[in-house]
Image (cartoon, grey):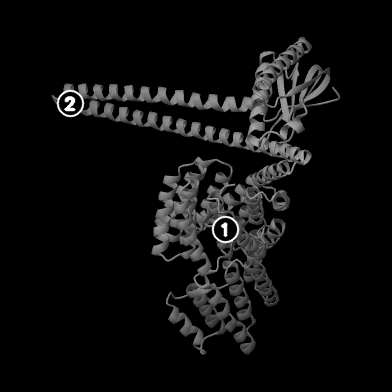
Amino acid sequence: MKLLNGLLLGVPLVLSTSVNAQTDLDSLYAIWQDDSLPDSTRVNAYSDHIWKGYLFSRPDTAEVLAEALHTYANEQGFSEASAIGYNLQGIANAVQGNNSHALEYFQRSLVIQEEIGDREATANSLDNIGNIHQRQGNYPQALEYLQQALSIREKIGDKAGIATNMDKLGIVYLQQANYPRALEYFQNALTIQKEIGNTDGMPGILNNIGNLYSSQGNFPHALENYQRSLAISEENGNERTIAACLTNIGIIYNEQGDHNLAREYYQKALVIGERVMDKKSIAVNQNNIGNTYYDQGNYLHALEYFQKSLTIREEIGDKHGVSACLNNIGRVYKEQGDHPRALEYHQKSLAIREEIGSKRFIATSLIDIGKVYSKEGKYHLTLDYCQRGLQMAEEIDVLQYQKDACQCLYEGYKAMGNSRKALEYLEHFEIIEDSLNETETAKKLQRFEFDKELLADSLRQEEEKHAIELAHQEEVAEKDKTRNMLMGGALLLLLVAGGLFSRNRYVNRSKKQIQKEKDRSEELLLNILPEEVAEELKANGEAEAKLIDQVTVLFTDFKGFTAMSETLSPKELVRDLHECFSAFDNICEKHGLEKIKTIGDAYMAAGGLPVPNDTHAVDTVRAALEIRDFIAEGKARKIAAGLPYFEIRIGIHTGPVVAGIVGVKKFSYDIWGDT
């Protein structure tokens, strides 16, 4: 399981205030103390005093200072002061990771804002409640509150608020992996920010769009949006958002395995964070630097940076960040073989994550603890923790975590001699892995298509550039009537020849590269679908299921597979299956059969589809005989070497089937029927 990088520049919580406050904290406090001023002026000045001086650097102090607003509300009969106080206390608790307390404060603020009829402040409170539900993984509730806030802002015509709401809704859909809906909200939010000229609101949205593409594995598009965000942030002179952009760009390079370049970006962001004294940014980048060292196996440096990040996060009361650092430190100790210390840190992390109700991260902690117990040979505890981790991973629908949990459970049951349960989780593991592989293939296809677009754009730009240069040279040649015209003309011809030669070389290279990427994309697609089905899908956007009157289906599995799996390690078992199924693939291709799927130790193929033919029965029988001979030869070799061996069972049947693909995601060609 990978360590977690810290993405920066999400959507902040909202403070209900309308004053353009002075930056000097003493001046703000003086306004608060001046009883000759209106209530709203005094209260907003004091809230700004807390916001600017304490809320993010010393949130525990901010929570205490906000109590004065409740006292003021009671003494002066100005209930808005109490609403703002609760809002500040909610944000202070959210900064510290106390989500349940934050939710309580925001709900108190909401009640008061609704009573006094302040619709803008009501929308802010609804926003903040939605944010807390989003942090806790309660996405339906988050959407409900954010939609309520959006409805109010649309009624009062608050365009800036509408844009912020849409951005937040996009984040929730992104976390649900509903990428089309998330992108729709992000783009709408960006359009509104452009319309109202709010360049300060654009970098965060662009970063979130970058996060969306990064989640899909479309790193070129992600990088493009991060770079756009960075350019606007630099133009605005906002160093905090510049640091956030650099952090996210670093994450892209780390995802691609370029840990050294990723570390360079994290270091740049770290320098800015230290300069502007943004402790949250400092801690995030220290954690990310530790992550690069961990990925490179440099556990000493990884531990150093995780500890630095932990110190700052404990100082600022960032419970979520503290839990992440503790878990990362636990993983380092696990890799170093110090299992007692690994368990100590993982258990501390789990306790915090359960306190703040972060389901996604609770799942990772449970699985990590299960893996450490497996290393210690305490398999009953392995099963307990990994089963709980699997349940949580299924609840939040994260396939990678489900895969990790199933692998842990397979190894635990196998070690305890429960072959039936071990096989059950091995099959579950393989199904999830197939699904993840299909997703990864789709991501690669997206990246290849984007690379082709980049090459095509570069080619067009180069051709346009040469055309302009040639036109300019022709104009100069026409006007130049001096006696050096012949020399100039010769030079012009030389330049033109050189330009044409260079362009032709570039065009040829680019065309070859585009064709190469296209061929790779086609190859990947044909690994998923039959050629005829793939062509229909590309041409029409869908492929109709077809009834084929006569096909011959081949089905194989291995005799005694469960017992054999008990004698092999997971790696050996998967290696032997891969060897057999690869041979089956080649045999089926040789005889014109279409591979349908594998499930555990079972292999299915069929002759006579997707294009019907009259030789399907003979083709299938010949393929079956060759598969039988391959397994027999392998059995003889294994017996001679004293190793476990496979024995195969083969079934063949002829009849009608319906063949096609169903659904809109993770296409898979399959057949249905009684054959």
Q: Is residue 267 left or right of residue 632?
A: left
Circle 1 residue = 341
Task: Give coordinates of residue 309: x percent, y percent.
Answer: 49, 61
The quadrant holding residue 507 is: top left
Q: Nearer the viewer, residue 29 or 363?
A: 363
Residue closest to the eye, 127 or 57: 57
Q: Residues within 10 Å of mark 2 (few under 14, many from 20)?
A: few
Residue occupying the point 49% across, 63% down: 280
Q: Is residue 497 left or right of residue 630?
A: left
Count up the numbered dots. Answer: 2
Q: Are marks 2 and 1 in contact (CB under 8 Å)?
A: no
Q: Identify the residue at image location x=43%, y=74%.
A: 23
Circle 2 SS class = loop
Residue type indicated by callout 2? Lys
Query: Circle 1 sits in a helix, a strand or a loop, which is it?
Result: helix
**Viewer-closest of 67 and 581:** 581
Q: Nearer the viewer, mark 2 or mark 1?
A: 1
Q: At which x and y percent is residue 306?
A: 49, 58
Q: Earlier in the sequence, mark 2 or mark 1?
A: 1
Is residue 342 in sight in this rendering?
yes
Type of amino acid under label 1: Arg
Left or right: 374, with 674 as reference point: left
Instruction: Residue 392: give x, y in percent of width and height.
Output: 71, 52
> Can residue 283 be seen in this snapshot?
no
Q: Distance from label 2 to label 1 (Cα)?
A: 86 Å
Q: In this rendering, is residue 533 above or below 197? A: above
Q: Is residue 345 above or below residue 25?
A: above
Image coordinates of residue 516 in percent, x first then y, are 49, 24
Q: Residues within 10 Å of mark 1 (few under 14, many from 20)?
A: some
Image quarter in which the C terminus is found: top right
Q: Mark 2 — residue?
A: 481
- Quick one: which residue is furthest to the right in this view? 674
